[in-house]
Amino acid sequence: MSTLLRILRFTRSLTPYYLGIMIAAAVVTGAGIAVPFITGAATDTVVAAVGSVAEGNGVPETAIRTVLLLALALLAASLVETVVSNVGGYWGDVMSAKMRTILSTRYFEQLLALPQRYFDGELTGTVVARLNRSIAEVTNFMKSFSNMFVTMLMTTVAVLVISAWHYWPLALLLAVAYPVYLWLTALTSRKWQRIEDDKNRYVDEASGRFSEVVGQMRVVKSFVRERGELSHFSTRFDETVRLTREQSMHWHRMDALRRGALNVIFFGLYVIIFVRTVTGHFTPGEMVMLVQLMAMAREPVQNLSWVVDTAQRAVAGSRSYFEVMDLDPAAVDGGGARPEEAPAAEVEEGPRVPAVAFDDVSFSYDGHEDVLRHISFEVRAGERVAFVGESGGGKTTLMNLLLGLYAARSGSIRVAGAGNDLASLRRSIAVVFQDPSLFSGTIAENIAYGRPDATREEIEAVAGRAAVDGFVAKLPNGYDTVVGERGMKLSGGQKQRIAVARAMLKDAPLLVLDEATSALDTKSERLVQQGLDDLMSDRTSLIIAHRLSTIAEVDRIITLRDGRVDEIGTPAELATSGGIYAELLALQHSASKADRKRLKRFGVVL
Ligand SMILES: Nc1ncnc2c1ncn2[C@@H]1O[C@H](COP(=O)(O)OP(=O)(O)O)[C@@H](O)[C@H]1O
Ligand SMILES: [Mg+2]
């Protein structure tokens, strides 16, 4: 229940809607409660008239006028109900749409704030499925609750007061019915909710896998895994069938019990009403009124279990919603709390300052095995530094730490001039990732991803430098060609060139290239390299290169071995030091298969 209060607090801006819906419901309920009184009065008038005719006194003059007026009153009550319930329904629809918007937006905002590590452990599809389910359930509940709560409350109170007024034992029996029903419902709830959680877990798992499979259909097909994937999927859903059986059996068994109990109580009520009418304590009109009132009293009691049912779903849904909302982005292990110090004043000169310093940095992804150990190095402003190490040696990880995507386990990383928050740090770094990923949209939009306000001229200028222009010229729609999910498919090399252009347009003082040209053929690589050389000429650059010729041109090389810095030096120094770089140089002249293989392990080609 407390989670539902949180939802209310969360969506405080919707209060006018909640109130509007409740007021509408109150009016509708009022009109509904008027009906038994009107029909009761009509019955008494009719009975009197019939009696008067039977005694030979003829139809009393006023009787027809009275019943006509009462019929008009009935019409008025139903018209009010019709109009107001539709107004309330409209408010309800708008309210749910707004609530959906608020909850979804907040969720997305929270996901965007969560650190990379959170996403390492989550299946994309699961994140999405969970969002949709939770929000649908919460919204559904809030809508029906604000609609029904007032009705239930008003009907209950009215029925209790009116029946107490006529004969207190009626009210007493009713007063027993409500708590008994609630108690039996509550008995059902805990088990129901536990099973619902399990069901949701299976569904989330299946949906997560589903979207993974859809996203990588080529892999699935080429390994002929369709049957395997299908059975993984259907097993999860079969589980939900099994759980639903158990859950529903439990629920309906309990429902039969509590409705049975209710039937017995209402049996007592009707017996009292009938007998007291026969004995002359109630007029026929009162009897009609009370019988209708009892029928009305039944409704809130039964709705109660429906409310409890949707409330349980909503509680389960909002629980997984708030599980994500409650994560403190800064506190998620390896989160935004990057141990960052104020930029050192002495290196801060001119607009293109940054220099990078790693000081005794250790890091592990899983908390057990360190991927990086005691890494220390400095990169001076304007310097070009290449990182060399075996594949899987932690080069990309080093760049992840630099970007603040993960926090170092120990040690500190300093980027001069980058400010103290992650956003400004990241704004000062342009990066080309090892695996270039683009968004659905046009080529121009993708290039301008980091600077949506860039002009077409600026976009085309960087496109030229990144050798994007060549293949774009051949497309009928040029830079407006839609790529990605629903558009044209690009080759790895084409994507990589767009990613390079994207980084170039960002024009940040610090450049990080993680095997930025690895997917390119020799010819286009030469073109892109020319553009990259221009870009690097006046800024600090950290390069993970896969070509020895590129590495040979940097200012300094840092080699990594077993997660540690092995050597730091100029290409000339390291060429003769007998380390990794020297070994690679020696290997490049060898034609032996084993040596080629060794080169490959360093991701190096000639
Ligand atoms: N997100 C991650 N979660 C857990 N382990 C990871 C993750 N990314 C990389 N690793 C592991 O860290 C090690 C270094 O990877 P990486 O930095 O990508 O190497 P390189 O870029 O030098 O090829 C590898 O053993 C890899 O399996
Ligand atoms: Mg890598």
Image: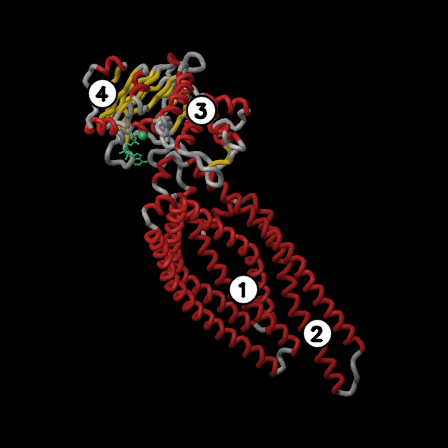
The three-letter amino acid code for the residue at tag 3 is Ala
Pick whichever, 350 or 598, lies toward us: 598
Name which of mark 3 and mark 4 comes first in the sequence: 3
Query: In this orientation, does residue 2 appear?
Result: no
Q: Residue at x 33, y 36 (%)?
A: 333
Name which of mark 4 and mark 1 comes first in the sequence: 1
Up the image or down, 278 lies above or below 121; here it is below
Do tag 3 and tag 1 residues touch (Cβ < 8 Å)?
Answer: no
Q: Which residue is mark 1?
A: 300
Q: Which residue is mark 4?
A: 589
Q: Is mark 2 within 8 Å of ligand 1?
A: no
The three-letter amino acid code for the residue at tag 2 is Ala
Color style of the picture: secondary structure
Do tag 3 and tag 4 residues touch (Cβ < 8 Å)?
Answer: no
Mark in front: 3 vs 4 = 4
279 relative position to 7: left or right: right
Residue 491: mark: none
Q: Which residue is mark 2?
A: 42
